[in-house]
Image (spheres, rainbow, N blue to C red):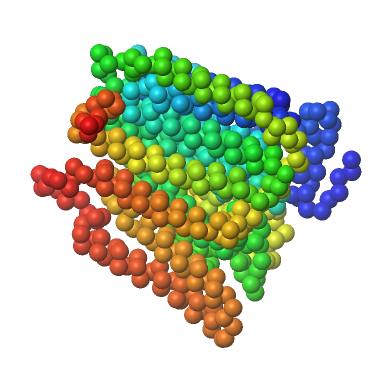
Amino acid sequence: MILLYSSPEALLIQLKSWTVSLAPAAWQPVLSSAISALVILLLFAGIFALTTLVERKGLGRIQNRPGPNRVGPCGLFQPIADGVKSLIKEDIVPAAADRAVHFLAPLVVLAPAALALALIPLGPGLAAVDMDAGLLCFFAVGTASELGAFMAGWASHNKYTILGAMRAIAQMISFELPLVLSTLTVVMLSGTLSLSSIAQQQGSYWFGLPAWNVFTPWGLAGFIIFLIAATAESNRSPFDLPEGESELIGGFMTEYSGFKYAVFFMGEYFGMFAISGLTITLFLGGWNAPFSFLVWIPSFIWFLIKLGLMLAWFIWVRGTLPRVRVDQLMNFCWKMLLPLSLLNILAAIFWHFTASWQFPGAWGLRWAIGFGMIALPFIGISQSGARQKKWGPRIYRYAD
Amino acid sequence: MSAVFIFLAGLLLASSLAAVMFRRLVYTALSLAVAFASLAALYLHLGAEFAGFAQVMVYVGAVAILIVFALLLTRNAGSDPEHPGHGGSWITGAAIAVLVFGCLAFNIVTSSACARPMPNPPSITTRQIGESLMTRYVLPLEVLGLLLTAAALGAATLALEDKRKS
Amino acid sequence: MSGTPLVYYLLLAALLFSIGLGAALTRRNAILVLIGIELMLNAANLNFIAFWRYSPNPEALSGFMFVLFSIAVAAAEAAVGLALIVSIYRHRRTTRLEGMSSLKG
């Protein structure tokens, strides 16, 4: 087979199909899947190692300390040291634990996260699984991690773990609603559930500026709602109540040690990568370059740059915001995010049906009205919520 | 029979049997989740992508979790040693189940509908499903929305009962 | 694609239905009875999907739509049923079906 160079993405695809064509015909589908899985796992395992290091160093800088800097130059080999440490540590299973479920729980958390990663298109044609109902599949596999949290919490036979598991399930179920509803606007306006076509549709430019979904009023509101819900869904700070160290020791992961804990950790980070990838695909233009004069940089590089920015944002938030209280969390989800994401659907409908406005200044007017449709209710809800003390500062009743 | 079908059918039967046989209720809920997931995989195997993912989302993500919650909330009820989980009339129940299966299997095997050849895989896109939901099936869809709203309100009312009284 | 004849899918669904029926008839815990009912519903869904796949005109989507609606109805049923069970448990401290039969004539 001759490799025809047209674009870097096409080169990668040709390389893969050439490798696959070397195998006997019966094994080709298996080999093709295996290569895709291997590439996804290796790529994101590498990003995982890098992220743990960057996160520890970044948090260190935020907290005015150097962070890990002993292993290798600038502490670059710290992830390797961490991996070796978790491998050779003793694997403790509590005597009262349910051994089978205790063993299975980390796998049930990791596997769906890795599956979700396979759905994210890294470039045109560069998705391991490109299916017509991709977005639905993403949310379907995401639901399995709730069961994993429950299994871990229940099997450990410890009140902290069961409390953490109940918190995790309640939080994940609640925040799934605004998460799904805010993606609904994108699905409505792009008319497809396929992630690669959603990314494809954001590939046009308007006077050199990108036509990403985030630059529309519904897209901006949806992006913010989605980002908050995604932070909660991946149990990241400030929504890390399921494992809140100061209250629950380690939440549903309390009784895990050694490699099983590392698998949990990896599952959590893979989930964060997957949801960041989905944010990029839905709102931030997928693999597309931000300006039309930068399209010569390959698409997957753009995707990875955006992924890095998303992860940096997650780390920054973790270093900056304190943990919320559990009633604040639930009130915020059900009384703030959910109504706003429903209103956002209305704003998206308005945007869709005013697309035919042609008079001068129509775009600005559409933007202003669409933005007002979400911003005014937001101000109203937050003011009334603050008056009824649904969120806001803690009131100390028994101590002062 | 294809190997995928044999594997999924075996998994489905084993996990659903486990779901109804286990004495520990949490095992029941977990094997039920496996049964739902393998059923979803069977839907995918039959080419019904959308239904398979809907099955995973609703059954594994919602129904199994709800059952887990209900089991944990009613945890002290099952530990009554005088009343085991199986009733005294379990032989009658099992006999009825076997009888029903016999009737169904006899009718299935002798039916002429089973001789149907397998047509080529249909190319149903999600867009087609959405369009027929919004045109031909729009009335059932609206009724379903009403039903789900009523169910959500009803479940919330039932669960809030204690709070309202106090 | 799958070369499995339709009859195997129907037999599998019949077996699943019988398992669900057996659970609904023999178990005394209300939650387990609900699980049996869910299994029976799922067996019917499997039949619908199999018939849809083997029908001469799958583009009509009849069986497929039936399954979508059935899944949504089953979700509502499970939510209300479990809320009822939890609510009864609060009053009578039991999930056994014998404990809930005080309205029997």
Quarter placement of the N terminus of chain A: top right
Question: At which x and y percent is residue A254?
Answer: 35, 27
Q: Name the side, left or right, on which B87 lies relative to A224.
A: left
Q: Nearer the viewer, residue A20 or A298?
A: A20
Position in image of residue A199 (x %, y %):
63, 56
> Foreground residue, A181 or A367?
A181
Q: Which residue sits at x=71%, y=29%?
A: C4
Q: Is residue A248 left or right of residue B101?
A: left
Q: Residue at x 22, y 32 (%)?
A: C105
> In the displayed structure, would residue A335 be above or below residue A241?
below
Q: Quadrant of residue A15?
A: top right
Q: Nearer the viewer, residue A135 or B100?
A: B100
Name which residue lies at 13% across and 45% down: B166
- Is any atom of residue B141 visible in this view? yes
Q: Position of residue A164 (x, y in %)?
A: 33, 34
Where does residue B101 sit, x and y in percent of width and height?
Answer: 54, 23
